[in-house]
Amino acid sequence: KNMITKQANEILKDYNASCLIFKNEELIYISSYIGVKPLIIFLKEHSSLAKEDNLLLVDKVIGRAAALLAAKIGIKNIITPIMSQEALEVVDYYSINYQEEKMVPYIINRQGTGRCPLEASVINTLDLDEAVKNIQGAIDILMKAQS
């Protein structure tokens, strides 16, 4: 069955995952971590992937932070159940094809009280290196708050 026509939720359920990356239709990465952690790990471990590799990302949620990480990785296609309006600017800017099931204004934090801190950290940038730095900084702050 063609992946592109299958709903993102179905694909993720099939693999019991939150994040999948395919290269030319072949599954090369699978993660069940929440948030952008899978993309950060992938970026660190697969930085050698050629930009012309046809990469497809299937992810539970695509906010601006995830979209910027996807662009940095060189993702060409995204399928997601939920995408934020703020991610839209990024996918358009980097010519990433996307298919979303539901568009939301922005990604909400885990407490449900406001904007996701990672999305907030990259709200004013389209620069990929700056984005990675800002996201890592926001994660460090969140980790400190938890310990």
Image: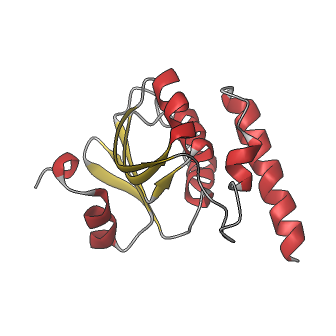
Above/below status of 44 relative to 144: above
Residue at 27% across / 50% down in the picture? 26
Residue at the left extreme of this rendering: 1
Q: Is there any visible trace of residue 9 in the rendered image? A: yes
Residue at 74% across / 54% down in the picture? 117
Q: Nearer the viewer, residue 133 or 112?
A: 112
Horizontal and vertical percent for residue 58?
Answer: 38, 53
Q: Nearer the viewer, residue 66 or 25?
A: 66
Q: Is residue 116 left or right of residue 48?
A: right
Above/below status of 3 relative to 147: above
Residue at 71% across / 51% down in the picture? 118
Residue at the bottom extreme of this rendering: 147
Q: Is there any visible trace of residue 48 in the rendered image? A: no
Q: Which colour scheme is used?
A: secondary structure
Q: Is residue 97 left or right of residue 111?
A: left
Q: In which quarter of the image is residue 38?
A: bottom right
Q: Is residue 138 left or right of residue 119?
A: right
Horizontal and vertical percent for residue 83?
Answer: 46, 48
Q: Nearer the viewer, residue 112 or 88?
A: 112
Residue at 71% across / 65% down in the picture? 113
